[in-house]
Image (cartoon, rainbow, N blue to C red):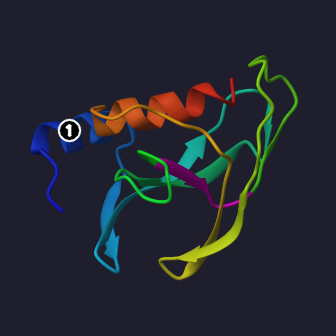
Amino acid sequence: MQFPIEQIDELRSIYPDVKQMEEGGTPYFLLPNVSLPGGATPATVDLLLRPVHMDGYDSRLFYSQQPTFANRTHPEALNWNAQGVHMLSRNWYAFSWRTKPGLTLAQMVAMHLRAVR
């Protein structure tokens, strides 16, 4: 699946080391060494954006480790319903969080990270 170069460039302006990847026909964007908000432990993880509708989610953001957030202020609890999901030769973790369709790649990541603030 192709994404507009403007969206990839926008994502790269925020995450300079982003890598576009694919597995089983599903596109992903690997965002290495991202600093997490909310007093996270670990403070830095790799993130994996799946920017397509699948399993009832318009997009999904996976974490290389399941962090904890000491200073998180968002009122909704995180439901870590994907634990140790094997993709792209690694295990990944994700919480249930819904975004809306029609977002750019950078907006998708921002909407997912909003939950951990």
**Residue topped by disc 1:** 7
Locate residue 92, reporting x and y percent: 63, 65
Label 1 crowding class (10 Å Cα cut-off): few <14, some 14-19, many 20+? some
Locate residue 84, reporting x and y percent: 71, 71
Q: Is residue 16 above or below residue 19?
A: above
Locate residue 35, reporting x and y percent: 61, 39
Q: Is residue 4 above or below residue 101?
A: below
* Residue at image location 22% in from the left, 44% down from the top: 8
Q: Is residue 61 magenta?
A: yes
Q: Which portion, as a residue range, is magenta?
A: 60-65
Q: Amino acid at mark 1?
A: Gln
Query: Secondary structure of the magenta portion, mostly?
Result: strand
Query: Camera-side residue: 60 or 33?
Result: 60
- Labels in figure, total: 1
Q: Is residue 34 above or below residue 108?
A: below
* Residue at image location 78% in from the left, 48% down from the top: 67
Give the residue at the far front of this rendering. Answer: 56
